[in-house]
Amino acid sequence: MIRAGRVTVDGNRARIGQVVDPDSARVQIDGVPLPIRPDLVFYLVYKPRGVVSTAQDPGGRPIVTGLVPDTPRVFPVGRLDADSEGLLLLTNDGELANLITHPRYGVEKTYVARVKGRPRRAEIVRLTTGVDLEDGPAKAVRARALDQSGEETLIEIVMTEGRKHEVRLMMSAIGHPVMRLVRTAIGPVKDRGLRAGEWRHLAVGEVRSLYSAARAAWEDASAPNSESD
């Protein structure tokens, strides 16, 4: 990769045998950052219901940072409501956290919601065309029904925003309140093997895939023929 010119250090083409300072050098492969700082950690956590997505809680509720090692200190990337569950990233990499949470980069988060009733096709489409909420319109990137049983339906919803209770409010707005909400993926990162309260380290390839997803979404949004909201 170095010989092919795919690796850069601080914006310059890397050389075979080059030595870099892991605390300050910015190394990229194909324009995507490669995390090399030795103090950076990346945890993928399955947040259980009842656990809050903060580093501290005045009310004394369980916090998500209590599920991972105490050191180094990390923080949750984005929010996942206390009543919701599923995948949450914890890290001390501020750059990656900003890329994942900022709407301009459009990193997708996938949820599966068990809702009351049997939403009609038009109602599911409405999730992607826009639902008016008190703090402004909200819409999903994609939405589809996965399964129906009796008067309950499983719906997969892909979002790029992370407003408080957004998915729940959207479903209530179309008349199908959420009974259970699970985040199943953050960008390309997913893990069906994690159980509530469990965590694991992200692989370097997974970290780079998150950086790459943010970059791709930003380039798509910046393209001259892209839609503007």
Image (cartoon, grey):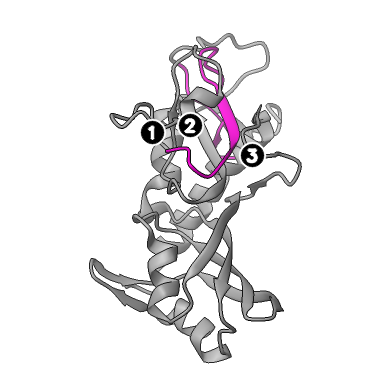
Q: How far apart are marks 1 and 2 (CA)?
A: 6 Å
Query: Magenta residues: mostly which secondary structure?
Result: loop
**Amino acid marked by disc 3:** Ala
Residue that sits furthest to the right in the current view: 193
Task: Work out whether residue 85 or residue 228 is closer to the camera in this orientation and state it.
Answer: 85
Q: Are marks 3 and 1 in contact (CB under 8 Å)?
A: no
Which corner quadrant holds the C terminus?
bottom left
Image x and y of residue 13, in percent:
55, 27
Q: Are marks 1 and 2 in contact (CB under 8 Å)?
A: yes
Tell me if 80 is positioned left or right of 42 in this view. Answer: left
Q: What stretch is highlighted in magenta?
A: 25-52
The residue that appears at 64% across and 39% down in the rendered structure is 196
Q: Which residue is denoted by mark 2 in the rendering?
A: 64
Tell me if 110 is positioned left or right of 175 in this view. Answer: right
Examine the structure image and report whether residue 14 is included in the region drawn in magenta. Answer: no
The residue that appears at 47% across and 26% down in the rendered structure is 65
**Amino acid marked by disc 2:** Val
Image x and y of residue 120, in percent:
56, 89
| N-term mark: 3 or 2 | 2
